[in-house]
């Protein structure tokens, strides 16, 4: 019989979490550390020594021998460099040691991480700094310490630093609004995130036979399978036993690491699945999602499978995203995006709602570029994922409220829950039934769900931008409301505040209503309507990324101290570089597979046809079928090989470009286009060449490989 798992004991077993800290740290130290964690303020350096010692003892008891500063450079991975705890005693023996200094600060030689020109190799030093707001944990015998990563001159070279800065900015501005509403108890507002993760599982044996999957994470070729997702029989379908065992194992591993994996189910495409965790602070959620992706991949290997996190591993079936559920919570537990019960709570909710709507309408380019990667470009706008046009879905009931506010507080009759309360704003109930799966940015009852994020992306990027643009709108609101409510030199004039707030809300909803769209965002008609409304449609990454350097963007990031101008230019360059380097690898894989796999196989097949034709003819049989087939194969083969020659020529031209944007545009317009041309020829060949001759597993073989 299977051993019963004691989940509550298992959960967080390998995490140096709050309860472990409380147990193991001197009371005073624990209190100081807790204060640092809650306020995001600088660590009291006097406690580092004591925390380090406790952490090390705990880790060593659990079998750890090494520690690592764990950070998120501007690549697609998390980085780690392991040091052991050993220290010589002088008599040839060693003891296990870990100092406060080693906990707080690391100095990896990090010259090979992308810095967008910020750090030349001659000043290669980078620093990692302990982030006490995300818990340390043990994995594979190593103590992992979440850290921020910055240059010698203090510029952020990672994704965590700006995320923490954006959370601070958001908290500062949100607190100003809460104070105006009379909240005196909350000390901080935290952006909360729950990142739903989609992925594919395929059998390792088919993976190993596909160079495109190995080197690029997606298939660069492949005719549609005989059966795809048209029967809708995979979504929420019963888990096959191999997948089920995998998910149980995955949960087990994630729970140990304190990741609150909650929901697992089959997704739309064959072989596609999803895991949803319980939400936490944006910072912890980003760290945990990075960890989740890693554990998903490792666990799959243990089960003889490969976990694909690419946004579009297969053409013609759904790609994978990462729904970024986002809300705002006070440190004393109030969700600011939860429509309240009292009219006043409702008005406060509407204020935050207005800020979010305004932020999306004013900075759609930033949200779009936060999800701009070569991989995600294949997914957005593919009638399976939101289009590249950013819009907000509110749902019928909330939309009626917004409309009522704009038109002067008249309330639709059918809704009995509405009453005209304070400020003549309608009272309404949370709507939990309204569902729209096609919107890029949907209100789902007490949070927003940003659905454009790609499955392989670090969620930090999207949340840095979301936090910053909402902070900016809250700043504007707070400036206006604080000024108005100080009318007549009073400390707080309630009537003036209420009037100013009323005007602000009516004006904001009226001016930014165009960003709200409650219909089907997959529909072509919406793209036309969006254009009429003046909403940007940044189809590809190369259209979106350069907007990072717009004057408006620089202003919002620098004024909230999330990015310096130098960091923005560096990041723009890195994003563009990541984009074209990805396509460059794909292009080389295309020519390699064609020349070394498809072309030889097709020649074999052509030879087989010709031999058959000759044999048939020698005994007087009609060989026209073979001859026609051979002609077709021959023509396609020639087109395929010619295409590769042209692709190589294009790649040769790219070395002459010096500008990242120019290079990225060339890769998008020319290289990617040529790759697609070659693919369509190969896919056509796949349909005519015999199974025994085809050199790689087909879509059918791959998508249905996990049995
Ligand atoms: P839905 O019904 O909208 O899919 P779920 O309750 O299933 O909502 O949650 C989906 C995801 O949203 C989960 O990862 C969950 O943790 C996350 N989530 C729920 N509430 C919040 C919140 N206040 N802030 C951030 N994420 C949240
Ligand atoms: Mg969801």
Image (tube, rainbow, N blue to C red):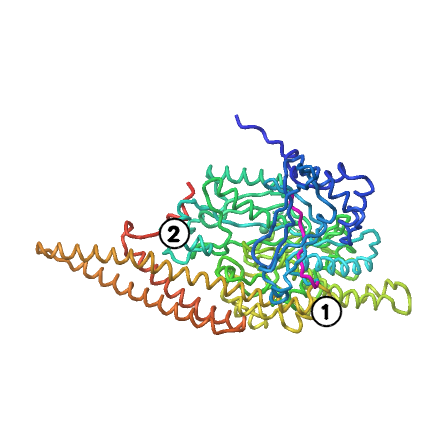
- Residue found at the far right of this picture: 489
Residue 354, can we see it?
no
Image height check: is 493 above or below 59?
below
Expressed as whole percent of the image width and height from the top left, the position of residue 593 reads: 37, 58
Q: Which mark is residue 241?
A: none
Expressed as whole percent of the image width and height from the top left, the position of residue 633 reads: 26, 61
Please name the residue shown 88% across and 69% down the image: 487
Mark 2 or 1, closer to the camera = 2
Q: Quadrant of residue 189?
A: bottom right
Question: To which residue does mark 2 refer?
Answer: 699
Question: To which residue does mark 1 refer?
Answer: 507
Callout 1: few (<14), some (14-19), or many (20+) C-alpha neighbours within 10 Å?
some
**SS at circle 1:** helix
Residue 104, can we see it?
yes
Q: Earlier in the sequence, mark 2 or mark 1?
A: 1
Expressed as whole percent of the image width and height from the top left, the position of residue 127 reads: 68, 56
Q: Which residues are magenta?
A: 143-153
- Residue found at the far front of this picture: 91
Q: How many marks?
A: 2
**Dividing the image into 4 quarters, which one contains the C terminus?**
top left
| 147 in magenta | yes
Which sits in the foreground, 193 or 644? Answer: 644
Q: Is residue 260 left or right of residue 132?
A: left
Image height check: is 566 above or below 615?
below
Spatial separation of the CA atoms under disc 2 and disc 1? 53 Å
């Amino acid at each position: 019989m299977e051993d019963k798992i004691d989940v509550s004991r298992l959960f967080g077993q390998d995490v140096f979490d709050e309860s472990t800290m409380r147990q193991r740290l001197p009371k005073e130290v624990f209190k100081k550390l807790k204060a640092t964690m809650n306020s995001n303020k600088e660590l009291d350096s006097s406690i580092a020594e004591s925390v380090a010692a406790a952490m090390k003892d705990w880790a060593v008891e659990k079998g750890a021998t090494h520690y690592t500063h764990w950070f998120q450079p501007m690549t697609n991975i998390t980085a780690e460099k392991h040091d052991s705890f050993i220290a010589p005693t002088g008599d040839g023996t060693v003891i296990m040691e870990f100092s406060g200094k080693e906990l707080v600060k690391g100095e990896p030689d990090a010259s090979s991480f992308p810095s967008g020109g910020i750090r030349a190799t001659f000043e290669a030093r980078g620093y990692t700094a302990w982030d006490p707001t995300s818990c340390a944990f043990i994995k594979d015998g190593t103590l992992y310490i979440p850290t921020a990563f910055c240059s010698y001159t203090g510029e952020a070279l990672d994704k965590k630093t700006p995320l923490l800065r954006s959370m601070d900015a958001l908290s500062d501005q949100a607190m100003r609004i809460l104070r105006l509403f009379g909240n005196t108890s909350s000390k901080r507002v935290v952006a909360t995130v729950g990142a739903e993760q989609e992925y594919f599982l395929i059998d390792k044996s088919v993976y190993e036979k596909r160079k495109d999957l190995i080197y690029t994470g997606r298939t660069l070729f492949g005719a549609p399978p005989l059966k795809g997702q048209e029967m809708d029989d995979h979504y929420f379908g019963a888990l096959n036993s191999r997948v089920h065992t995998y998910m149980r194992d995955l949960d087990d591993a994630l729970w140990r690491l304190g990741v609150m994996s909650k929901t697992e189910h089959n997704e739309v495409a064959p072989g596609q699945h999803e895991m949803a965790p319980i939400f936490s602070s944006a910072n912890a959620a980003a760290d945990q999602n990075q960890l989740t992706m890693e554990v998903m991949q490792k666990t799959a290997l243990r089960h003889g499978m490969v976990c694909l996190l690419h946004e579009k591993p297969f053409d013609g079936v759904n790609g994978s995203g990462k729904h970024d559920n986002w809300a705002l919570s006070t440190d004393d537990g109030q969700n600011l995006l939860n429509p309240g019960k009292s009219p006043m709570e409702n008005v406060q909710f509407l204020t935050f709602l207005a800020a979010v709507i305004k932020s999306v309408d004013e900075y759609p380019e930033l949200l779009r570029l936060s999800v701009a990667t070569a991989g995600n470009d294949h997914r957005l706008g593919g009638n399976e994922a939101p289009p590249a046009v950013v819009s907000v879905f509110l749902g019928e009931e909330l939309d009626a409220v917004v409309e009522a506010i704009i038109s002067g507080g008249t309330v639709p009759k059918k809704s009995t829950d509405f009453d005209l309360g304070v400020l003549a704003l309608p009272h309404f109930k949370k709507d939990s039934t309204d569902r729209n799966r096609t919107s890029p940015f949907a209100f789902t009852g007490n949070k927003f769900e940003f659905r454009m994020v790609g499955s392989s992306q670090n969620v930090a990027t999207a949340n840095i931008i979301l936090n910053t643009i909402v902070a900016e709108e809250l700043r504007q609101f707070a400036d206006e409301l604080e000024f108005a409510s100080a009318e007549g030199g009073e400390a707080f004039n309630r009537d003036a505040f209420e009037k100013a707030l009323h005007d602000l809300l009516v004006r904001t909803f009226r001016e930014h209503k165009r960003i709200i769209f409650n219909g089907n965002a997959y529909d072509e008609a919406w793209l036309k309507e969006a254009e009429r409304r003046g909403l940007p449609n940044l189809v590809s990454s190369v259209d979106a990324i350069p907007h990072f350097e717009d004057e408006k963007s620089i202003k919002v990031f620098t004024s909230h101290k999330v990015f310096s101008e130098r960091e923005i230019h560096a990041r723009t360059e890195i994003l563009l570089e990541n984009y074209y380097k990805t396509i460059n690898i794909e292009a080389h894989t295309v020519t390699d597979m064609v020349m070394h796999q498809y072309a030889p196989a097709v020649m074999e097949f052509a030879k087989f046809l010709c031999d058959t034709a000759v044999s048939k003819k020698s005994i007087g049989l009609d060989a026209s079928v073979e001859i026609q087939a051979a002609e077709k194969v021959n023509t396609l083969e020639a087109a395929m090989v010619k295409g590769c020659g042209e692709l190589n020529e294009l790649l040769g031209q790219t070395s002459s470009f010096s500008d990242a944007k120019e290079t990225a545009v060339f890769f998008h317009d020319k290289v990617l286009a040529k790759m697609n041309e070659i693919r369509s020829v190969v896919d056509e060949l796949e349909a005519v060449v015999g199974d025994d001759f085809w050199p790689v597993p087909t879509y059918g073989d791959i998508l249905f490989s996990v049995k």
